[in-house]
Structure formats: structure tokens, C-alpha cells
Amino acid sequence: MLEAARGERSEWMVRRISGEKALGDLSMRGLVLASWSFDASPAPEELPYPIVNASNSAGVREGVGNLLSDDVAVGRMAAEFFRRQGVTHLLVLGIAGKVVHEERFRGAVDHARYLGLKVQSFKHDFLGPATEMRSFVEYTDWIRELLSPELESMPLGAGIFCTNDWVGQQMLLLLQRHFPEHLDGSSILGVDNDADHETYYGTQLPALSSIEPAFREIGREAFHWLAAHPGPEGVEQMTGLNRRFPPLRVVERASTAAGSCADPLTARMIRWAWERLRREESVSVTEMARAHHLHVKTLERRFQEFTGGNAVDLIARMKLDLAKSLLRETALPIAEISARCGYSKQDVLSRALRAAEGCTPREYRGRVGSDE
């Protein structure tokens, strides 16, 4: 919405705020985008400006323009992603009591069952007795007690879909501390996660893969509607008009690198390769075997047994996936992306991308840029 307002040189004053204190600033004028939960702030009718809820987790609030995507489709995309990975068992974790999360939860559970996956599902507010907890570690231990029955009955190689990024990060930390075999062998997917860092509360974690809702498209459409229908009534009516936007794509990071492999050692080797690629370090089958104290032939047999393919092809796919991610999400020169992803020449990346996507790196960047 901000981009649309700036791009069209709108006379509207649009401010993005975060936090309830700023929301109560009665001197503000124009349109306010609230980027976080505001449950305890003044009621919309008490404020001199219309509010748009730009958070995908705060849910729906009456009297506010809620930027809502097709959240059932978000859940369906998660189920389809795991099915393509070869997952046969899916754990779906949802935040209870919030419309967007209930819809994502329902979409994932129903579609996964339709696709033939075995589904475990669990809903909770995930808040816990927060006032009694003195540290984040205590909270993680509480989550462990809450989810132990689900995790203890979940087979290795299962997929885990969390209806938002925060729960997904909790799951990564929980698995690292208490269920390391699942951290190695299970894929975790959140929603709209922008935490591409590997450190979470001082702990090294794989970055969380995520489903990306079409919030840029929703914001653009909402702005055009509000420009034609100004005032609080226009804001409130906007919610229904901006509800049918499907998610854009899955952004794959380290939390799905293992491909839900049921063998922890093979999954660990896959994650090892992914993390080295992201650090711009060399990756080869020989280096992988040496790092895990295996003979190359033993490694290849293991990959064939547990992934149905070979390590050489998997490394090639990872290199291309990383290159596509950098083409989508950065403005780096193509030659630099090629070098970062371990290609000897830019032409090698071009040939790999043409074989996979039917286009050159420049064409791919233009294509995904126009989709946004």
C-alpha cells in the first residue's frame, strides 16, 4: 500500500506504525498501517484516522481494514509443497481462535488428506502461562510438554507446517534442544517469515522456509479501493474485497533443505551441503563424505536408498535453488550470483537455469519481478 501511494504521488498521508503506543497518537492524520497486533489500543471509532491492519497474524478486528489473503490457499500450498517433497506424514500446528490461522490450518489439513498424506493436527493459543515464566528457555520447555505426544508419535521424515513464522521458529528451537533427530530429518514450513538469519535467541538454527502471501498485491489493490472510497466506511468494506489473493510461492531455506529424509545421517549431510552453499563455501560429494567419515560409495548408496537419487544431482539442485532465490530477492549482478553459488562461469548457471525453467537468469529475474 505504501509503494502504491508513493508510486502514484498520492496526496494521502500514509504512515506505517508498530506498537500500540504509536497507534494512540491522536495528532496523526491520514491513513495508518498497523504492522503488529493492537488488541489493547483504542477502538477504531475513537481515533481520528482510519486504520488498516497490515499484520498477517493479528487476525480480524471489527472496524479496521484487514489485509487478508486467501489463507485456505496458503494451507493448500503447504500440503502440495510437502507432497512434492515426498512427505507421507504431516504435522499441522495452528494458532487457535484467530481467523487467518484457522483458515490456514483447515486448508492444510483438508488438502493433505485429499492428497493421501497421513495428518496429525494440533491447535493451541501457544501463549502458555507466560507471566510465570522467567526465560525463553522455560517457555520452550513448556512447549515441549505441550507437544511431546505429537512429536513422540511423529515418524522421522515427517513434514511440519506452522500457520505462522513465530510458531515455526519455536519448533526449530524445540527440535534442536529436545528432538535433534527430527531437526535433521523433518522439514519445517512457516508463513510470511522474513527471519533469514540463522541465530534465534542466541541459538544457531537453520533459517525457516516460508510461504509468502501476496501482501504487496493486496496492499496495491487496497490502496486503489481506498482512493476511490475514502473514509472509515471504505476502510471497513475493503476487507471483503481484498480476501481472494492466493499466496505467491514457497521460499525454501535451510529448514526444508533435508527434504524430509527419514534417515537422520543423510538429512544431516543434505543440511551440511545447504549451509556451506549459503556461506559460499565449496561443496562436493568427496568433501561431504570426508566430513561425515564415509566412503564415497557408501554415501551414494545411502542417498540412493533414502532419497531415491544421488548426491551429485542434489547438490546441483541446491545450487540452482540458491541462485533462483538470489535472483528473486536481491539486485546482485548475475555474475556475482553465479560465483556465490559455486558455478565456474556465468554460462554454466545460464545453461542450468535454461534447462530447468526455459529462460536465462536475466529473463527469470524479469519474470518473477513482474509477478510481484
Image: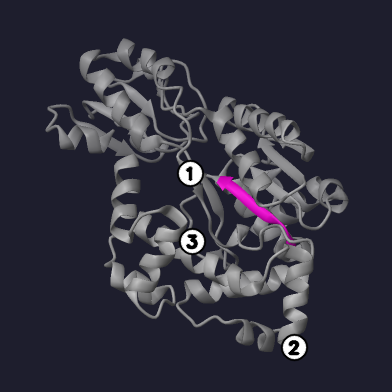
Residue at image position (29%, 30%) is 220
Dot 1 crowding, Cα within 10 Å, few <14, some 14–19, many 20+: some
Q: Tell me which label, 1 or 2, sits earlier in the chain.
A: 1
Q: Tell me which label, 1 or 3, sits earlier in the chain.
A: 1
- Percent across and percent down for residue 177 are 73, 65
30 displayed left or right of 188: left
Instruction: Identify the residue under disc 2.
Output: 295
35 displayed left or right of 70: left
Quarter where residue 138 is shown:
bottom right
Above/below status of 279 relative to 147: below
Of the residues shown, which amino acid type is indicated by label 2?
A: His
- Percent across and percent down for residue 7 are 16, 37
Residue at image position (28%, 60%) is 331
Residue at image position (28%, 50%) is 366
Judged by depth in the image, the label closer to the viewer, 1 or 3, is: 3
Of the residues shown, which amino acid type is indicated by label 3?
A: Asp
- Any mark on residue 290, and which? none
Dot 3 crowding, Cα within 10 Å, few <14, some 14–19, many 20+: some
Q: CA distance from mark 3 to mark 2?
A: 27 Å
* Total numbered circles: 3
Q: Tell me which label, 3 or 2, sits earlier in the chain.
A: 2
Of the residues shown, which amino acid type is indicated by label 1?
A: Arg
Q: Are marks 3 and 2 in contact (CB under 8 Å)?
A: no
**Could you say whether the residue bearing mark 2 is in a helix, strand or loop?**
loop
Instruction: Identify the residue under disc 1.
Output: 249
Judged by depth in the image, the label closer to the viewer, 1 or 2, is: 2
Residue span colored magenta: 185-190
**Could you say whether the residue bearing mark 1 is in a helix, strand or loop?**
strand
- Any mark on residue 321, and which? 3
